[in-house]
Image: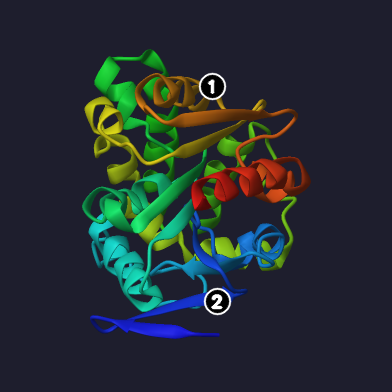
Amino acid sequence: MPTLDVDGDRLHFTDDGTGTPVIFVHGSCGGAGQWKAMAAGLTDNHRTVCLDLFGSGQSQPWPIERVWTAEDDERAISAVLDRLGEPAHFVIHSGAGHFAYPTIKNRNHDVRSLTLFEPVYFNLLRETGDPLFAEPEQIANRFREAMDNNDLDGAMEGFVDSWAGVNGAWASLPDAIKAMMKIGSNRLYHEWKTNLHDEPSRQDLMRLETPALLFKGSRTIKSMHRVCELIRQHLPACDYMEVEGAGHMSPFTHVSAVLPAVKAHLAACDR
């Protein structure tokens, strides 16, 4: 698998297919392997690049003592764009909305399109004084408190069960998935500050003219329903699809339902 040295940090990624490049950016505690099924469905016409962000998968480990910011992922994504040498489509899930945003803002000429699976722009709730901001804030506080108490399993259980909306979701995961997710727990400790309080704002979204396709699972958490409403209200060139029966993980649990729309979106933006 290819790797890049980015200012001394190892970045691992997959690189398959030929054609217009598509960069897949995973969310918190995720990894490149999550995108395997969707990327495979696009390789006939696109070059698919799936990242293990720093502190995730096979990329540079991230000690909890090392402060993480979205600018660290900007370094990683920019290095991949430089390697590609041409603009790319971006497919992002959850926390990747924040991880990729500095690149989307600062290198917008290199972004052909956006496919957004429930980007966690919880700062939009804070900005509008929405009481639903309390939901992600509580998830964040519980995770960080458990990590401060050296209770990694408790932190991950609260994180996964809260997003799934059911108790026992973490316990039911295969050990291999748990191990993969735990790798990203150190940077998630820092991510929660960024996800709740940083850009983009509503004004930032209104200035973003990149064509976008937004997906939302019909069974996602309450605050995410509202976040997606705000995105649709303020992002100018945004198409929308609700994935019936899906929760927050629709790009991985409902690939057959979302892939045709993703293909159509990329094809329209390639013309």
Between 186 and 270, the residue placed more toward the observer is 270
Residue 259: give x, y in percent of width and height. Answer: 70, 47
Say which residue label 1 marks: 222
Q: Is residue 194 left or right of residue 122?
A: left
Which image quarter: residue 177?
A: bottom right
Query: In the image, is residue 226 above or below residue 82?
Result: above
Say which residue label 2 marks: 15
What amino acid type should be assigned to the residue bearing mark 2?
Asp
The residue that appears at 57% across and 37% down in the rendered structure is 163
The residue that appears at 72% across and 55% down in the rendered structure is 173
Give residue 89's mark.
none
Report whether residue 266 is seen. yes
- Give the mark nearer the N terminus: 1 vs 2: 2
Query: In the image, is residue 116 above or below residue 138?
Result: below
Secondary structure beneath dot 1 equals helix
Residue 17: give x, y in percent of width and height. Answer: 62, 74
Other-residue count near label 1 (Cα within 10 Å), few / some / many at <14 / 14–19 / ≥20: few
